Image (cartoon, coloured by chain):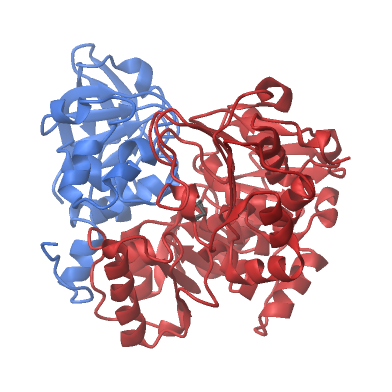
Amino acid sequence: MTIAEKILARRSGRTRVAPGDLVTVAVDTVILFDNNFMPNRWREILAVRDPKRLIVVFDHRVPAPNAQVAAAQRTGRAFVARFGIERFHDVGAAQGISHQLVADHGYALPGDVLLCSDSHTCSAGVFNCLARGVGQPDIVYAAVKNETWFQVGATVRYQLIGTLPTAVTTKDAFLQIAGRYGDHATQNVEFGGPGIERLSISARKTLTTMAAELSAEFATFEPDAVMIDWVGARNSQPFEPVYPDPDAGYVALREVDLSALEPLVAFPDSVIENSRPIAAAAGIRIDQAFVGSCANGTLEDLTLAAQVVAGRQVAPGVRFIVTPGSQQIYRAALHAGVIAQLADAGAVITPPTCGACGGGHLGALGPDETCITATTRNFKGRMGDPSAKIYMASPATVAASALTGTITDPREFLR
Amino acid sequence: MTPMRFEGRVWSVGDNINTDLILPIQAFYLAAEEQARHVFSANRPGWAAQVRAGDILIGGRNFGMGSSRPAARSLKNLGLACLVAESINGLFFRNCVNFAFPAIACAGVSAAFAEGDTAAVDLDAATVGNVARGTVLAATPVPDKLRALICAGGVFALLEREGLIAAASKA
Ligand code: SF4
């Protein structure tokens, strides 16, 4: 069995599962976030099976941009108080994007089942667990009953080899996969191979987070010492890493040579089947450049962007917006001098939140504007006006583009 | 159990329809019923007003990719009887089931219909037929447990009956 199949079998009390099976599993962790409490979605929960399994995070629109969101956050705080939920990330010192907080705090253990009603919850699959985005009803059901259902999907295995060249990141590796293989609807993706050992957790997490764009069911990473140490340093609970069986059945086995990659750009309106080499986009004028989100708001991403812009200036007429993924990252970047480098170059640093990624606040796009973004989605209308054009690339490419005012190869600035 | 069979006029929308097209950010703060009027406002302005109760939506590959937002609820509130697509994003499919909006994957469905045709969808038999052409395609069966959940009115109806969540407010 593959990693996903093994966890599904273990957690549903079966010896084996196979693609197509419908299984019921116990859920270890349920995360609710600010949008869940909006009046057009929220249904008041009267009973919770196990409040210790719940986490509440305000992330999509923080601090509240208007009275409606402020009211939703009040509803959320009342929910937290009513059920005595201890892991609560309100606006303040522990603020951050839920998927980043899972990494920062070790909330996902290998072998776990974790649900959140945000589609990029698959991010936590970097920790060798089954994490996925579900809908509002699913999250309410799991909070109340502590269980959920999954239909077992077939698994595609990505075998990573080689080392990333300078100025090329796992965002480019993702764009390569999405461009070449398209959607993976109803399938799991599993990452492994000798190439992973030189990738940090942050770099790996970009791949699992972006798996939502492949329409993957679950994204998982094969365990290794880097991951086990990361989780062990943040969570004292015992855990058992899950390795795929040597005879695991994959619907496809695909090799990705990291050393052969170059910077790529997804063109507007679609992430899949829409990647082109940077040269094909070079010279396109931009109004805004954005680095942030659950895919690219880590200290490593901010540092990379800072390396590109350090000692230089953002082009006139360009808004370069940088949103750290969590307050912990913001403070680390502040103390490391990364925030100073970015701000001195002309970047605007916002508080940690989803912000412009979801088009909700702090960087929405106007009619006919063009943005290059290191986030998760470039759908029509995603970041504001439907006539805006959204190109997607790595934080290095976004930062380089902010300097010139046109889409630019980061290798011109990082050698 | 109540049979799940639908016959209706077809709208055909192609591959990779995402949730930002179905439930755009501009409708974020609106009440659920009003959100439905914004379906496809970016790619097919005016379409939502043309939909009649009982119409059937036919999609291509990877229908509903994207966000967890309650976009399936908007399709239901628009009065559509059901969704048939070549393949459906797993999260979107969950939302269909949970909001009691019948949805079924069916390979070959895009080519089998032109817009305006009449489709006969049988969720129990897992078949999708083009009434005028007389052709019938085999769809991917919806597991009994999920079919039952759709019949029961979805997750909120279920939890409300069990007294685990409050009744819907008018907000
Ligand atoms: S950062 Fe963007 S993709 Fe990630 S959870 Fe927030 S809105 Fe969703």
Q: x, y percentage for residue B100? A: 23, 50
Q: Residue at x 55, y 62 (%)?
A: A99
- Apparent side of residue B85 relative to residue B52 in the rendered image (left or right): right
- Apparent side of residue A93 relative to residue B15 in the rendered image (left or right): right
| Most foreground residue, A313 or B6 | A313
Q: Is residue A368 above or below residue A202?
A: above
- On the question of residue A299 being in view, the answer is no
Q: Residue at x 49, y 73 (%)?
A: A29
Q: Colour of chain A?
A: red
Asked where in the image residue A73 lies, by quadrant, the reply is: bottom left
Q: Is residue A40 above or below residue A71?
A: above
Q: Is residue A171 above or below residue A285?
A: below
Q: Is residue B12 above or below residue B87?
A: above
Q: Residue at x 20, y 41 (%)?
A: B36
Q: x, y percentage for residue B6? A: 16, 33
Q: x, y percentage for residue A404? A: 69, 33
| Most foreground residue, A92 or A188 | A92
- Apparent side of residue A329 relative to residue B122 in the rendered image (left or right): right
Asked where in the image residue A385 lies, by quadrant, the reply is: top left
| Most foreground residue, A129 or A250 | A129
Q: Farthest residue toward the top?
A: B133
| Most foreground residue, A199 or A308 | A308
- On the question of residue A337 being in view, the answer is yes
The N terminus of chain A, quarter of image:
bottom right
Q: Colour of chain B?
A: blue
